[in-house]
Image (spheres, rainbow, N blue to C red):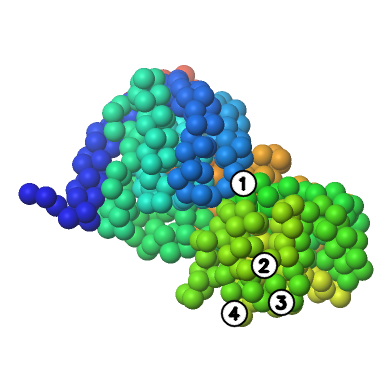
Amino acid sequence: MQLDKDLRSVQEVRLLLEQARQAQRTMETMDQAQLDKIVSAISAAAAANARRLADMAVEETGFGRKEDKEIKNRFAALTLYEAIKDEKTRGILAENREKRTIDMGVGVGVVAGLVPSTNPTSTVIYKAMICMKAGNPIIFSPHPSALNCILETVNVVRRAAEEAGAPAGSIACIPTPTLEATQALMKHPFTRLILATGGAGMVKAAYSSGTPAIGVGAGNGPAYIHRTADPALAVKRILDSKTFDNGTICASEQSIVVERSMEQAVTAQLKAQGAYVLSDEEHRRLSGFILRPNGTMNPAIVGRSVETVAKLAGLTQVPPTARVLVARETGVGPGYPYSSEKLGLILAYYVEPDEQAVLRRCVEILEWEGAGHTFSIHAQDEETVKRFARAVPASRVLVNTAASLGGIGATTCLFPALTLGCGAVGGSSSSNNIGPLDLINIKRVAWGVKELEQLRAGGGGEHAVQVDEGLLGQLVEQIVRRLM
């Protein structure tokens, strides 16, 4: 009998989950060295295929630039590997002999990995590596418009992992992506955690599934150029960031905010460095193409060249050398589409009367969209940096760097990651740059150090239980052998 597409996809998910559950049982017996060997193999294979997979991603989706997607693939394969290769995720993580406690790391179980079309190949590499490091099988739910490049990337990392000792079924991908399949994956009792990277609707669905989830909210970060900054260098960093992979990294700047006293210098640098400042009429024309009627981002502007976006909006005066389209804006929220997230080569430009007004505007932008994600500031005055960091609702405050690359940890010392938690203010369960330590549970082993009589008497003191250190050591060894 030929099943309908949605029914077939749900059945595929069930089979993959059965295989992943079997793989999980095997992975539970693996030690740290075995997991590390698998991660090392994935790193090498992904790096060797970085350009080929980047080419596939751009050719299939039309988003971004091949050379930049190759950098992201290498970042996931190599920079991430260097950050996690010596991390301890399995067995004893910490031992306090004085307090008689032991912390032991164990994997959470089968992970559902949602993959977006904007960063399809690098996301697969990254999520596969952090899951294998933590000892968790992962099943990917691919975005339909990036299915082929995602499937190929999964095959690359899966083959490398299995050749290094990973059990069959530990890395897999839904071959027929449907909404029903993704929902079945997220809600299935074998799925223990969801890593949700994608649109707001998908992330919300992950949190509503009943399964623990780590999601990423919208990135709508404003960039403040303070009066102590070098305008030329600040604008360079912002444009380098915004143009990297045509603006598809969610930590990239979405608006520039300056005081009135900085307007002339910043505007001059924007024009000198290839930004095209829209006229009032061009502003009006382009504004109609940023959002869809339902208020969500228009995919037609995502990751596309300036030339493509200009043609779409009928902007005939934009020179071929233009790197970014800049629109002066005065408001935030409904009716001000430039104030929303734009994963493309469009920047809003706000000019405020003073620094306090700048701060209010930055908070307003983040509270409208992007709360908990990223804020960037270009300044030499450290007190100003600290004041803004305390006030803005952002999990990452980036100073004097390209936000897209600083947020993921490429130009900063933040943990290298392609899933950036937004914290409680952004509706996320974590504010971390997500890594293997976010994907394990920690067992606590604790010896008794008091008796009930001591609690009734108000404490320990001279009656504290004395534990034989030799016996304690033997007990520790026995527990470790059983849990490894």
Q: Disc 4 marks which amino acid?
A: Pro
Which residue corresponds to mark 2?
315
Q: Earlier in the sequence, mark 1 or mark 3?
A: 1
Tell whether 174 sits left or right of 106: left
Q: Residue 72 lies in what quarter of the image? A: top right
Residue 448 against residue 220 in the figure, above or below: above
Image x and y of residue 32, in percent? 45, 24
Q: Residue furthest bottom?
A: 335
Q: Earlier in the sequence, mark 1 or mark 2?
A: 1
Q: Disc 2 marks which amino acid?
A: Leu
Tell whether 283 sits left or right of 443: right
Residue 45 against residue 425 in the figure, above or below: above
Image x and y of residue 52, in percent? 50, 31
**Mark 2 burial class by Cα count in 10 Å: few <14, some 14-19, many 20+:** some
Which residue corresponds to mark 3?
281
Q: Earlier in the sequence, mark 4 or mark 3?
A: 3
Image x and y of residue 17, in percent? 25, 42
Q: Earlier in the sequence, mark 3 or mark 2?
A: 3
Q: Residue 28 lies in what quarter of the image? A: top left
Q: Find numbered disc 4 in the image and state the secondary structure of the residue it sits on.
A: loop
Between the C-alphas of marks 4 and 3, the distance is 20 Å
Tell whether 207 sits left or right of 302: left
Q: Residue 277 lies in what quarter of the image? A: bottom right
Which residue corresponds to mark 4?
334
Q: Residue furthest left?
A: 1
Between the C-alphas of marks 3 and 2, the distance is 9 Å
